[in-house]
Image: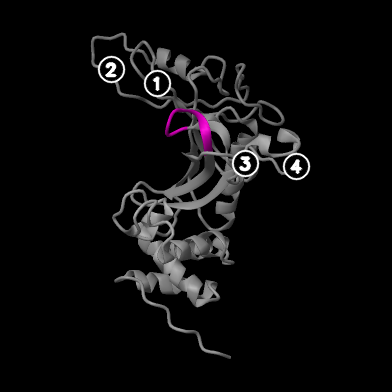
Amino acid sequence: MTARRSCPPASGPLEGYAARFDGLFVSLAQRRGFREYLTGLLAPRDRNKTITCLAGAEPVAGAGGPAVQRLQFFLSESTWDAGKVNSQRLELLREQAETAPHEGGVIVIEDSGDRKDGTATAHVGRQWLGRWGKTGNCVVAVTTVWTDGRVYYPRHAVPYTPAHRFPRKRNAPAFRTKPQLAAALAAEGKEAGFPCRAVVADCAYSVSDDWYLALREIHVPYVVHLKPHRGTWAPADQPHTPIDAARALAWHDAAPPATGRPSSATSATATPRPGGPPTPGSAAGTRSAWHGSSSPPPTRAGCRRRPPGT
């Protein structure tokens, strides 16, 4: 068998890290492209999401240069497996005591996008773009990040394909909503050895019953931001929405108000209000909630946390 040709090393300590991935690439061009890609991502350059910047070339004018074309081929045409590379990256994080996941961390779910002109790019469509606060033509990915407040790193990312790109729209068997993609990533993280105390998401996921039920099925707790008028399960005499909770915690005393306090309750006959997510079976069981507080008029939404198996 012909011996592998040596690859030009990456700069400094990056070579030791890049060498841990060499077994996943079958050619010298792929190993070299991987090192150039890592160097471009970590170099202090502006707009490192563009090929020219990643390759260290001049925008537009340098697009036809050999380094740019070589990197373009590596990212879009070469036959390496991105899933295996990501699995190797996560394995290296698990091996280090400083970055190893543990039960005290959380998995944060976020969907972020980038503007994209035209319709030819895969997954592109007119949809909500959170970072710009408006609807536009963009590509959106659902991302999971593991963090314990001390360190954080991305775990997985899955592109969201808008319904209009399927022949049968939302009825297509392959169509998945963002909450469905997020729940699948959370389950995948648990199976891959990423323990967490909860899955955390913003209020966009608080309206999806599929998301709640999927996490309940795999026994993963969650904390989700609630919209101000979104109802939740609670005893009849307890607040059912963040607005109710803020009013219940309103300051009516001469003493300085508290910045916030937890509000929880357990009941065998919890009564739902309209707007809360349904739970299979009886409404009996333990229900708990945490709400943010504010002085009147209420201006902050709250969060809901449900322990696994309830």
* In this rendering, the label closer to the viewer, 4 or 2: 4
**Residue stretch in magenta:** 130-138
Q: Nearer the viewer, residue 299 or 13?
A: 13
As drawn, the label of residue 289 is none
Q: Secondary structure at mark 3?
A: loop
The circle drawn on residue 257 is 2
Q: Quadrant of the C terminus?
A: top right
Packing grade of label 4 (10 A; few <14, some 14-19, many >=20) is few
Q: Amino acid at mark 3?
A: Thr
**Amino acid identity at mark 1:** Arg
**Residue for badge 3:** 161
Q: Is residue 197 visible?
A: yes
Answer whether residue 133 is magenta in the image. yes
For discs 4 and 1, the disc positioned in front in the rendered view = 4
C-alpha gap between disc 3 and disc 1: 32 Å
Q: Earlier in the sequence, mark 4 or mark 2?
A: 4
Which residue corresponds to mark 1? Answer: 300
Relative to 37, 128 lies left or right: right
Q: What amino acid is found at the position of numbered circle 4 in the picture? A: Pro
Badge 1 element: loop
